[in-house]
Amino acid sequence: AAFEGCSSLVSINIPNSVTSIGEDAFSGCSDLKKLYVYFRDPSELKIGSNAFSDIKNCTLYVPEGTEETYNKWNSEFRVFKKKKTWHR
């Protein structure tokens, strides 16, 4: 997996141009603190199983006005207990 176990990774930006995130891609990135996603509709992004497993205390930043959509969407994003919105 791309960044599996990369403990030095602290922030990730996932732009709209990304169409999928592979299985275990960021699994075990224990120091990850911020994940920014640019999708207004999270179903546009295909996420492999365990893509974000073993990540603790990371905040998922979603586009303004989409927090409820991300809360309802059952995906790998459910591992993020904290969600915040950001302005473009």
Image (spheres, rainbow, N blue to C red):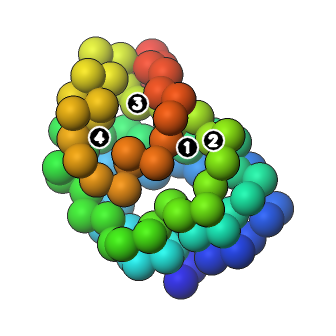
Task: Decide if residue 54 is on the left or right side of residue 88.
Answer: right
Tally of numbered discs: 4
- Could you tell which of marks 4 and 2 lies nearer the N-terminus? 4
Residue 70: image x %, image y %? 29, 34
Which residue ends up furthest to the bottom in the rendered image?
Answer: 1
Q: How many residues crowd mark 1 within 10 Å: few (<14), some (14–19), many (20+)?
A: some
List the residue tagged with mark 3: 62
List the residue tagged with mark 4: 39
Q: How many residues crowd mark 3 within 10 Å: few (<14), some (14–19), many (20+)?
A: many
Task: Decide if residue 25 is on the left or right side of residue 46.
Answer: right
- Could you tell which of marks 1 and 2 lies nearer the N-terminus? 1
Please tell me which residue is depicted at 32% across the width and 23% down the height of the picture: 67
Quadrant of residue 62 within the rendered picture: top left
Give the secondary structure at mark 3.
Answer: strand
Task: Decide if residue 35 is on the left or right side of residue 70.
Answer: right
Residue sitting nearer the eye, 22 or 55: 55
Please tell me whether mark 4 or mark 2 is closer to you in this view: 2
List the residue tagged with mark 1: 35
The kind of residue on which mark 3 rests is Val
Quadrant of residue 63 within the rendered picture: top left
Q: Does residue 32 appear in this view? A: yes
The kind of residue on which mark 4 rests is Phe
What is the C-alpha distance between the residues marked 3 and 1? 9 Å
- Could you tell which of marks 3 and 4 lies nearer the N-terminus? 4
Q: How many residues crowd mark 2 within 10 Å: few (<14), some (14–19), many (20+)?
A: many
Please tell me whether mark 1 or mark 4 is closer to you in this view: 1
Please tell me which residue is depicted at 28% across the width and 53% down the height of the picture: 75
